[in-house]
Structure formats: structure tokens, C-alpha cells
Image (tube, rainbow, N blue to C red):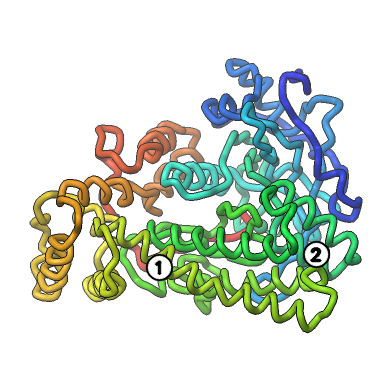
Amino acid sequence: MIHLNSLKLQNSYINLPSQFYTRINPMPVKQPKLIIFNEKLANALGMDLPFDDTEMLGNFFSGNRLPVDLIPIAQAYAGHQFGHFSILGDGRAHLIGEQIMPNGKRFDIQLKGSGQTPYSRSGDGRAALSPMLREYIISEAMHALNIPTTRGLAVVSTGESIMRSSLMKGAILTRIASSHIRVGTFEYANKMLNREELKMLADYTIARHYPKLINQTNPYLSLLKGVISKQAKLIASWMHIGFIHGVMNTDNMAISGETIDYGPCAFMDIFSIGRVFSSIDSHGRYGYGSQAHAAHWNLTKLAESLLPLLHKSMDESLRLAEAAIETFGDEFNSAWISGMRSKLGLFDEEEEDFNLAQSLLEWMELSKADYTSTFRDLTYENLSKKEIYKSLAFEKWHSLWQARLSRNSKPIKSSLNMMRKFNPVIVPYNHLVEEALSAAERENMEPFFELLSALERPFAFSSSNEGFLNSPVVPNPNYQTFCGT
Ligand code: AMP
Ligand code: MG
């Protein structure tokens, strides 16, 4: 049995009013088996666990045998899903505690797929193996790509089958997050609770994520501005690596600024601004090029939820909220162009840089070029000899880019070095992830481990990522990803 004193788990969330959560234990599973365990992350978190005892770890990360004095909770929240408001909450997750790292940082440890809660509605409280491994590998890839994200600590199979489109193997993911406070948590507090309770959530969030704001004259307005700024940067960083979240409902947007909830997400291969993978996103609400707009929409919901705290006068609150929300566009554009400059090796700033980056994307779309490979090819000293680059349109763009590089205040070597830090050699393309997952379904974890290991160092060419560099030979334009599995 793992004891609480070998961990450093706390439960600050239960100091909030009881409407914010329900105390509930995970529902035991039949036969827990540890499939993957992130030893490095456990070490970094300062968790003193019996690394070699897979049986004990399986029992712990399934929730079957938790230290007796632990206080697992399911969190209450709401959310706008594809524009429609619902009361939600952790319907299949248990927050087992907050781990305090050796450096004092606090991280939620959450089991996902760990059984029903009062928020399950008609759901079974469970999750399937393949989507949990998918969340694990994509979130770890995002972390290695320097994108703020929740992370995977472990996946345990349950020995139970669950019903989805067919019978699937059940599993539980252990997810680590700076917190699980969402835009939807504030919507819940504003719609369902009173002003004092909303204020308690805001104060808790500020103390946890924005402690420097505590003494500001209007900390709640500063909180709103802080979240806007973090989200603007986050979405720009998704755009830079060709990531599509796929289900940017307000309950899937974290106040911490971390990417959360890897459901129907995907990395784009062939570039298209309107690219959508999610099976349920028929109008492209959360497509690649719509992500800044979707974030802006979600942030207006956060602003609306904070109105009672912004000012005594509702008119003044509205004015403050609108002014804050208006800054999103500039924050996003400036984060976007700054990242594109790094991807293209541009030092200093020229007004035309925006058009230069934009026209490369337009060429990619017209030529059906692969997003990651195109940027990777630009990091070579000499232009790649691939057929796709032998067009007048590309040559025209390339000479404009070369001319811009020659106006840099630093030598070409510095540009290439910078580009190699910002343009990954490898990303988790759908076809690679699918291959690894279908082998895992057949109880062969080798391909999964190999891919994971390659994704841990995405900016370097190495023998471990050699086999994974290419986009699919025949890209599948109809590839779909799914929610809630
Ligand atoms: P998601 O699409 O994963 O962000 O989930 C949206 C909401 O549905 C959250 O409140 C989840 O807890 C809940 N949910 C998703 N799948 C299940 C399930 N199998 N059982 C119970 N609740 C679920
Ligand atoms: Mg969610």
C-alpha cells in the first residue's frame, strides 16, 4: 500500500464552498494493469513511489487502493459546448490530490476514467485504452514542443470492457495539471452560486495561478487580462506547430493557460487553414484557422462570468470587460508574428514580415504541402530538391525570404540555429499515433514506446526519430478524430 506521507498531496480545493465539488472515491476496477508510467515526471513531482512494483502502481493509479487518508473529489463546472450552455462537472474523473513539488509548485493529480460521479449524467464514468494512450502521448509531445499542457503520469488498463461504437478495453489515465479550473468553472459559479462564492473561486484562482495580482487595485480585472494574455499566447503556439485542439468548449479551456482535454485533437499534415478532424465539428467551429476566434468567444464567457466582481456598477463592469476582451486580437497577432519570425529565422521586425509568413501559408495550401515538413525543409542550409519546391510560385516566395534574411542584423547561421529551435523535426502525425495505438490494442506496446521516445526530442534529428519523419505517403483527407471515448 502506498502511504500518503510518501507523497506530498494536499487538498486546497476543498476549502472552497462545497458546491464546487463532491467528495467521492473512484469506483474500483476488476483487474488493474500498469501499461505506462512516467517515471521522470513522477521524480520531478517529488513522488516517492515504488517504481519497480508495477502491481502496487497499478492499484494506485486505478484508484483501487488509495492511501486511506486521501480525499478524492469530483469538481463541479459548467460549459458552453459548441455554443450551448450545460451544467457539467467531472463525470468520469477524480482529483485525488494536489502534489507539492520540491520547488513548491502545486499540481493536480487526476484520474480520468475512474468511475461515475454525481456529474456523470448518462455517462458510464469510464474511458477506453486507446484514447487514454492518445491523450498521454500527444500531451507528452506537446510538452516536449514547449507548449503549456497537462501531462500524462500513467495509464492503467482496467480488465473491463466498455461500450462505445463497439466493445473497447477500459483504461484510466492519470493526468497532471497546474489546476483543473476552467472557464466553465467560473460560468458555473456565476450562474449557479452567489457573488461571494464566485469571489472565493476568483481569490483561490488568483492565489494559485496569479499570486502577483493579489495586491492590485482591481485583481479580478487583472485576472481576466492575465487569462486573455496566456490564452492568446497558447493559441498562437498551437498555430505555430499545426495543432488543432478540436473541441474548444469553455469547459476545455484552462485558466492556467495549459492545453487541456485531448479528445478529437490532431496535428495537421497537409496544410489547410480550414482543416477539421473532429467527427462532430461539422461546421468547422474549432477548425485550425478558427481557433483564435473560438478562444476569443470563450474569453467573453469568462469576462461575463466575472462581471459581478469587476466593479460596483454593472455599466462600468461591462466597459472594463469589453476593453479587456478587445486586447485579445492584438495579443494574439503579436504572439503569432513573433513565433512566425522565429520559424522563418527573422531577426528584427519589418512590417512586411506578416505578408511573408502569410504568403508561405497560402502557397502551402495551394500546393497541398505538409506543414511540418515545409518548415523543417527551410531549416536546411540548401533548399531541398523535392519536386514541390520547383514551382515559380515557391521560387518567388523563396527569393523574397532570402532577401529578407539578408537584411537580418545577424548572420545566416544564427537564423538557422533559431529556426531549428522552433521548427520540429517530428510531430505526432495521425498515422503514426494510429499505428502505435492499434499495436497497443493488440498488447504490443513497443511501437508506442518507440514513438514516445522519438517525440521526447522533437527538435533534433536522431536515429530514434528517423522512421517517423515523413508525413503519410497518401494523406487521408477524411481522417476523423472522436470525443468522449
Ligand atoms: P469532454 O468532451 O471529455 O470534455 O467531456 C465533456 C463532459 O462530459 C465532462 O463533464 C465529462 O466529465 C463528461 N463525460 C465524458 N465522457 C463521459 C463518460 N463516459 N461518463 C461520464 N461523463 C462523461
Ligand atoms: Mg472536457
Q: Work out whether residue 389 or residue 446 is closer to the camera in this orientation and state it.
A: 389
Q: Is residue 293 left or right of residue 156?
A: left
Please tell me the numbered disc located at residue 108.
none
Q: Which quadrant holds residue 482?
A: bottom right
Percent position of residue 409, x then y = 20, 56
Q: Is mark 1 within 8 Å of ligand 1?
A: no
Q: Which residue is mark 2?
A: 188
Task: Categorize mark 1 by other alpha carbons within 10 Å: few (<14), some (14-19), many (20+).
Answer: few
Q: Is residue 485 visible?
A: yes
Which residue is rendered at x = 41% and y = 31% of the image?
446
Quadrant into which the N terminus falls: top right
Percent position of residue 168, x then y = 61, 47
Percent position of residue 93, x then y = 73, 47
Q: Is residue 450 left or right of residue 307?
A: left
Q: Earlier in the sequence, mark 2 or mark 1?
A: 2
For this orientation, the residue located farthest to the bottom is: 315
Q: As shown in the figure, which amino acid type bears the numbered disc 1?
A: Asn
Number of numbered discs visible in the structure rendering:
2
Quadrant into which the C terminus falls: bottom right
Q: Which residue is mark 1?
A: 478
Q: As shown in the figure, which amino acid type bears the numbered disc 2?
A: Tyr
**For numbered disc 1, what is the local secondary structure?**
loop
Which residue is rendered at x = 65% and y = 24% of the image?
47
Which residue is rendered at x = 91% and y = 66% of the image?
194
